[in-house]
Image (tube, rainbow, N blue to C red):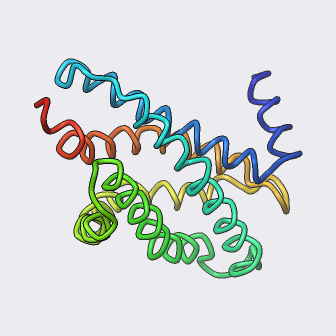
């Protein structure tokens, strides 16, 4: 509980940085967990891949989530009594953010796998819709819970929502890594 209290105080003082660090931890932990699970098959641990995931969380996913959720909560759907507000928030979120985040990350993974810019763009475009469809098996219900049940802490911090979704994100990132990396980066070892 003390660690959670320290975390919440840090997020209250530094909401943007806290969200970015939480996202970096979630993505890094998910990748690390997947690499541990995959190690018997690959006999390889790739620290650069772990860093790539964590940096994506820190520099892309974290900032995007902070700005996007603040916009959803306080600009687009600012009336908390709006009819079906959480469902509308989830629908708008799920019609945009999976394509932005998964598409950009698939591009980064393709570059990491040695593809050129144009090959990485093609790879991201070809794989984005299947990955997003896969994400729809998980994230809509998580976002409904997130917007219905977990209240934002205050006007500037959505810390409980960030913590909740990043906890789920560790599992999603583990699965995403397995599906994306098993056949792309480690295919020569399997």
* Residue in the picture at 53% in, 40% down: 54
Q: Is residue 127 left or right of residue 87?
A: left
Judged left or right of residue 65, residue 2 is right
Residue 64 shown left or right of residue 175 in the figure = right
The residue lying toward the viewer, choosing from 50 and 68, is: 50
Say above or below: 46 vs 26: above
> Can you say which quadrant of the picture contains the N terminus?
top right
Residue 185's spot in the image, x, y percent?
24, 41
Query: Would you place residue 1 above or below residue 21 in this image?
Result: above
Q: In which quarter of the image is residue 166?
A: top right
Q: Tell me which residue sits at (33%, 42%) in the image.
A: 177
Residue at 59% across, 77% down: 84
- The vertical placement of 34 against 98, above or below, is above
Residue at image location 26% in from the left, 48% down from the top: 180
- Count of picture labels: 0
Closer to us: 150 or 75: 75
Out of 20 and 88, give the one closest to the viewer.
Answer: 20
Extreme residue toward the right, this view: 13
Residue 13 percent location from the top left of the image = 89, 45
Residue 52 location, x and y as percent? Answer: 47, 42
Which part of the image, by quadrant, shows the C terminus?
top left
Coordinates of residue 142 in the picture (x, y in percent): 48, 54
């Amino acid at each position: 509980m003390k660690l959670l209290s320290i975390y919440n105080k840090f997020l209250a003082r530094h909401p943007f940085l806290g969200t970015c660090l939480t996202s970096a931890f979630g993505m890094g932990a998910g990748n690390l967990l997947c690499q541990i699970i995959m190690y018997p098959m690959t006999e390889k641990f790739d620290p650069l891949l772990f860093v790539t995931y964590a940096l994506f969380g820190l520099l892309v996913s974290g900032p995007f989530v902070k700005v996007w959720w603040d916009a959803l909560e306080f600009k687009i759907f600012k009336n908390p009594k709006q009819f079906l507000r959480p469902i509308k928030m989830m629908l708008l979120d799920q019609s945009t953010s999976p394509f932005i985040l998964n598409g950009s990350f698939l591009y980064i993974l393709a570059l990491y796998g040695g593809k050129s810019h144009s090959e990485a763009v093609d790879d991201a475009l070809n794989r984005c819709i299947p990955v997003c469809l896969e994400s729809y098996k998980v994230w809509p219900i998580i976002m409904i819970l997130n917007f219905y049940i977990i209240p934002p802490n205050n006007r500037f911090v959505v810390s409980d929502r960030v913590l909740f979704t990043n906890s789920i994100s560790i599992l999603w990132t583990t699965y995403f890594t397995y599906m994306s990396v098993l056949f792309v980066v480690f295919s020569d070892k399997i």
